[in-house]
Each structure stands twice: as C-alpha cells, then as structure tokens.
Amino acid sequence: MPPVKHRKVVMLGYPSVGKSSLALQFINGDFPKEYEPTIENSWSKTFVLGNDEFELDVVDTAGQDEYSLIPQSFIFGIHGYIVVYSVACARSFQIATGLHRTLVDKRGKCLMPIVLVGNKTDLPANCREVKAEEGKKLADSWGAAFMEVSAKDPEKSKQIFTKIIEEIDRVERTFGDEKRCFLM
C-alpha cells in the first residue's frame, strides 16, 4: 500500500449548525446527546479510501458570525474546508456565504476544495428555511461539492469527509495539470 496521505480540513459555520456533531459522528461513530459550544477542537482519523490510506486532521471551529475573523491558522497548511449551515436556519446559510467570501479574500481566487453541507435534514419539513436547490446553487457558484445530511446518520457524516478528500484530490490534480511543463 502507498504511504499514508496526510490531509487537514477545517469546519466552518454559524454556531449550533452541527459542525461538532458531524465531526464526532465521523471520528467516534457517536452523536452527542447535549449541545456544548465549541471553542476549537482537533481530531485525527486514519481511514482507507480506494487504494489510499489517509490520516485526516479535522479542525472543528467555534461558530462564526459576520463579525468573526478567520485566523491565519485556518488558511495556511489547510487542504480543504467543510462549510456547514442548518437547513432550518436561513441566517446560517447567509453566514456560509460570508465565510466563503472571507476565504476567497484571504486565500485569493484559486481552486479551493470545499464541501458545502446543509445539516439537520432530520428535522420536520415545516422547520426547513433553506431549500436544497438554494444550497446546490450556492455550491455550484463556488465550484464546490454540495450535500444535505443529518449528523445523526453515521453513513452521511462519513460521506462528507470522503467527499472533502475527493475534492482535495480533484483540485490537486487540476493544479498539477495546469502547471506541467513540456519540453520540445
């Protein structure tokens, strides 16, 4: 088997959209019973995807609002981003848009591996404030992947982290193709 590939991703989003719940479901296979606001947590998990083994470092951030600053530590040395909003909170969707704008301001207009995640699909339909089509349209405008999930579903949580690895590899391959030199 090839050497382990190290990847570091940051989870961003409005407070209480489920960033920690998604991460803990993936890392530990457990959905937290109580809400505890996060300051910042980091976890690592090694897993196999296809023929490759990955060590994934996940940085779970405190919830952001429009006044939050994204520190440089969330820009440099980061391979990808998971931007989370709640399908039951239009404000969290607006904040996701602002977070992307801030990332572009800090990183520049470049290919950036992002998965936009609409969480809390397990809530009753009458609680929904953000349609799936809106999330898909926003992700498409970013050139990002899009998923709607419930952090209570372990398989869906795993798919988010699988998708960010795929997005990182897609961007790395694209970057590599553009920078190749040919001698004649």
Image: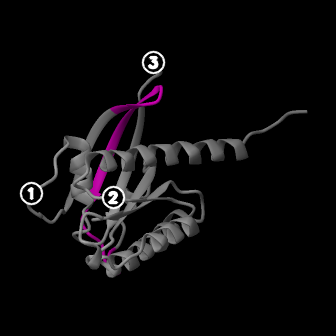
Classify residue 11 by image quadrant. Answer: bottom left
The percent position of residue 133, horizontal first and vertical second, equals 48, 71
Q: Which element is circle 3 on?
A: loop
Where 70 falls versus 169 (above or below)?
below
* Residue that appears at 40% across and 72% down: 96
Q: Is residue 80 left or right of residue 65?
A: right
* Residue that appears at 24% across and 68% down: 123
Way the structure is coloured = one colour
Say if the magenta span includes residue 59.
yes
Where 92 falls versus 152 (above or below)?
below
What is the C-alpha distance between the residues marked 1 and 3? 38 Å
Q: Which element is circle 2 on?
A: loop
Say if the magenta span includes residue 131.
no
Disc nearer the start of the sequence (2/1): 1
Residue carrying label 3: 1
Local crowd at mark 3 within 10 Å, few (<14), some, or many (≥20)? few
Q: Are marks 2 and 1 in contact (CB under 8 Å)?
A: no
Q: Amino acid at mark 2?
A: Val
Q: Nearer the viewer, mark 1 or mark 3?
A: 1
Quadrant that contains the N terminus = top left
What is the C-alpha distance between the residues marked 2 and 1? 18 Å
Q: Which element is circle 1 on?
A: loop
Q: Is residue 16 left or right of residue 48?
A: left
Magenta-tinted stretch? 47-68
Disc nearer the start of the sequence (2/3): 3
* Residue that appears at 52% across and 62% down: 107
Residue carrying label 2: 149
Residue carrying label 1: 33
Q: Amino acid at mark 1?
A: Lys
The percent position of residue 134, horizontal first and vertical second, equals 47, 74
- The answer to whether one can see residue 139 in this image is yes
Q: Is residue 139 left or right of residue 34?
A: right
